[in-house]
Structure formats: C-alpha cells, structure tokens
C-alpha cells in the first residue's frame, strides 16, 4: 500500500460494523483503502452495533451480539457521535463468544479478535471498537491497506456525489461497492470522472460452498468457527478473481 500511487488505489467506502459480515470483510480486503463512512446518520437495528452469530453445535439457532449505544442527538445522531453505553460489559460479550465457539478449531483467532476489540483502551469509543473488530482479522489475513475517515474529506451530501467526491479526494481509480451499491449508484457520474466501478460477483459464495446466509447475514466470526481459518483465508484470497467491473 505504501508504494501505491493514487492512480492505483481501489477504494471501498463502508460504515463501521461490529464484527462485520463476511461479504463486507471480503470487500474491504480487496481494496487498498477503506474509507470509514463515519459522518452519516447512525442506522438503528442494522449492522453497525451488532453482529449475527450462531452456535457451533446448533447453527440453526442464531442470536445478536450487541454493543449497547447512546445516540446523543436521537435519530439525527451521526455514526461518529455515537458512544458506548455505560452498561457495556466486554467480559459478558466474551463469555457469549465462548459459549458459542470455544470448541471450534478456530477459537484461538476468534479469541484474539475479541480481546483486541474489547480493549480497555477504547473505553466508550464506538468507532474504535467497531473498526478494531474488523481490522484485527483483516491484518491477520494479510490485508495491507489503510483506513481513513470520510469526516476528514470534503464531499457533497447527495448519496452518489458524496461517494464520488470521496473517491476523487483520494485520487482513486476505482470504487469497490457492495451489492446494495449496484442497485442505487449512478454509474455515469463515476465514469464521467474516469473512476471505475467494481463489485464482487455473489457467485463467489456458492463457488466456495458457503451458504448465502452465512455470506451476507452472519458475522465472519461464524464462518471462522464453522469452516476454519483456511476456508476464510481461501475465500478472501480467491475473491479477487471475482471482481467484476460495472458499466
């Protein structure tokens, strides 16, 4: 990453997620720069402060591991204004992971991810905790990219133009979007600025024999626990072959 010029940067732009889903992790892994979208409105009951997990012996039983948060401006609270509530108990969260996955062959790395995420150094810092929950496993898998915050960049408020401005501000040649982005992005405004659009072909999950639900609904921790480190490593390594350019 340090040797890349701006014209070689493939960028992903995504809100911080608590122990993100495998499809989100794979998208970031394939980018040179992860722009954390931290200055947009916090979305309740989505993925930003909670992770969907299951049990090793009974994977059909799923549950949410949730970061209790305080939205200091109510529904208008931006992600970078969210704080962790005082009743957050990292030890209790770790015990939940132990009950689910301690007998997994990947428990050691799951435990490492949890410990680095639940660090006391973060206190009530929502952004630090959620970013750490993704960065630890990304580095473990060999990701050499960098992280920036959208709040540090100049951009317009329109959804398409905001993403375009972010890409332009870092000099990216391409933007790697998720499945949702394929549906709402106006590709013409990007192509006009000579910024290419990419996505990851969803056929990847079936090729790697991963259920669609485990790919896009459950945390990467669940894939680690049930399928092992080798499967997750193979998945992210192979995923670059499934990048498709959008027109």
Image: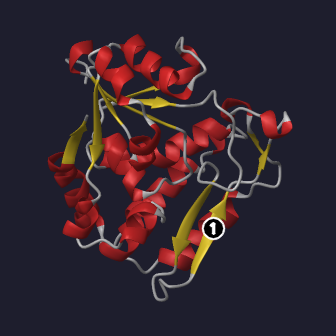
Nearest to the observer: residue 232 or residue 186: 186
Quarter of the picture holding the N terminus = top left
Above or below, 35 against 181 in this view is above
The answer to whether residue 172 shows anywhere in this view is: no
Give residue 243's quadrant in the image.
Answer: top left
Task: Assign a secondary structure to mark 1.
Answer: strand
x then y, percent, for residue 6: 27, 14
Decide: is 120 above or below 20. above
Q: Please tell me which residue is depicted at 49% across the width and 26% down the height of the picture.
A: 160
Residue at 84% in and 33% down: 73
The residue identified by callout 1 is: 64
Is 41 on the left-hand or right-hand side of 130?
Answer: right
Residue at horizontal 14 percent and vertical 48 percent from the top: 241
The picture places residue 173, in percent across and down from the top left corner, at: 26, 20
At which x and y percent is residue 63? 61, 73
What colour-coding does the image apply? secondary structure
Residue 38 appears anywhere in the view = yes
- Quadrant where the C terminus sits is top left
Against 17, residue 12 (above or below) is: above
Of residues 181 and 226, the one nearer the viewer is 181
Image x and y of residue 119, in percent: 60, 46
Please identify the quarter of the rendering in which residue 82 is found.
top right
What residue occupies the far bottom of the structure in this picture?
A: 57
Badge count: 1
Residue at screen point 60% across, 51% down:
118
The 10 Å Cα crowd at callout 1, few under 14, some 14 to 19, many 20 or more, is: some
Nearer to us in this view, 140 or 232? 232
Answer above or below: position of 72 versus 193. below
């Amino acid at each position: 990453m340090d040797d890349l010029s701006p014209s070689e940067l493939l960028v992903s732009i995504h809100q911080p997620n608590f122990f993100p889903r495998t499809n989100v992790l794979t998208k970031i892994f394939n980018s040179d720069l992860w722009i954390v979208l931290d200055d947009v409105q916090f979305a309740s009951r989505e993925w930003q402060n909670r992770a969907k997990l299951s049990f090793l012996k009974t994977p059909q039983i799923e549950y949410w591991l949730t970061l209790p948060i305080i939205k200091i401006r109510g529904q208008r609270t931006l992600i970078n204004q969210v704080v962790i509530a005082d009743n957050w108990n990292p030890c209790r969260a770790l015990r939940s992971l132990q009950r689910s996955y301690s007998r997994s062959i990947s428990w050691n790395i799951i435990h490492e991810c949890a410990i680095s995420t639940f660090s006391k150094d973060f206190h009530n810092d929502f952004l630090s905790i959620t970013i750490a929950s993704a960065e630890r496993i990304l580095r473990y898998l060999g990701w050499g990219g960098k992280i920036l915050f959208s709040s540090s960049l100049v951009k317009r408020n329109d959804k398409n133009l905001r993403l375009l401005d972010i890409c332009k501000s870092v000099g990216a040649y391409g933007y790697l979007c998720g499945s949702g982005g394929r549906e709402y992005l106006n590709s013409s405004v990007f192509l006009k600025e000579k910024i290419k659009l990419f996505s990851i072909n969803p056929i990847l999950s079936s090729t790697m024999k991963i259920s669609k639900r485990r790919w896009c609904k459950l945390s990467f921790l669940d894939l680690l626990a049930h399928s092992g480190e080798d499967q997750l490593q193979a998945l992210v390594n192979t995923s670059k072959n499934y990048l498709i350019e959008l027109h």
